[in-house]
Amino acid sequence: MEFKDVKSHFENNHRGVITTFRANGAGHSSIVVCGAYQGNAAFVIVRGNSAKTHNLRRDPRCTVMSVSDNWRTCAIVEGQATLMDYHNTDAEKMRVELREVFRACGDKDHPDWEEYDQAMVTQDAVIVLVKPDHVYGKMS
């Protein structure tokens, strides 16, 4: 299976579970809002100091599972995560990318983009793009 085979699932089902890896090798799972962006599974970590951020900075392996509302179908992407934040990305580019990933991970625009932009700066938000190395799932 390739990402193109599950892209529509990620575009239409934004409930997700990710797995990152702790320093001892144990998995760490978190609930996220996810989507498809530029050929990757994508999500935003709204608090840059979270355990998942620390895990991904140390070990970029990540699994993203998009699940349907009724939990009957899922699509899974395993791969290497690329992290974008205000420390490694130009502020204007980051602002634009955060908005685009927000849209990719939901079905509507934010009601107040200026408020969103400020919150993402204050919370030190991180965009995570997971390049698909292994793709699978239960689609029907």
Image: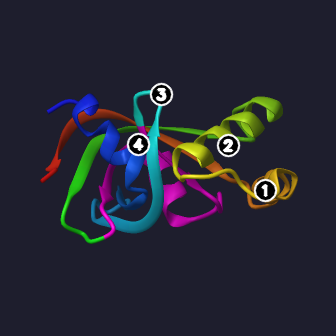
Of the two numbered discs 2 and 4 on the same chain, state the one appearing first in sequence: 4
> Of label 4 and label 3, which has the lower sequence position?
3
**Residue 32 locus on image (x, y percent):** 46, 62
Q: Are marks 3 and 1 in contact (CB under 8 Å)?
A: no
Residue type beneath disc 3: Gln
Residue at 23% in and 56% down = 74
Viewer-side label of 4, 3: 3
- Left or right: residue 134 versus residue 107 is left
**Disc 3 versus disc 1: distance between alpha carbons?**
22 Å
Q: Is residue 66 magenta?
A: yes
Q: Is 50 part of what is drawn in magenta?
A: yes
Q: Which residue is mark 3?
A: 38
Q: What secondary structure is found at the residue carrying circle 1?
A: helix
Q: Tell me the distance, in whole angstroms, between the alpha carbons under discs 1 and 4.
A: 27 Å
Q: Check disc 4 and give the amino acid type.
A: Pro
Q: Which residue is mark 1?
A: 116
- Position above or below: 67 against 113: below
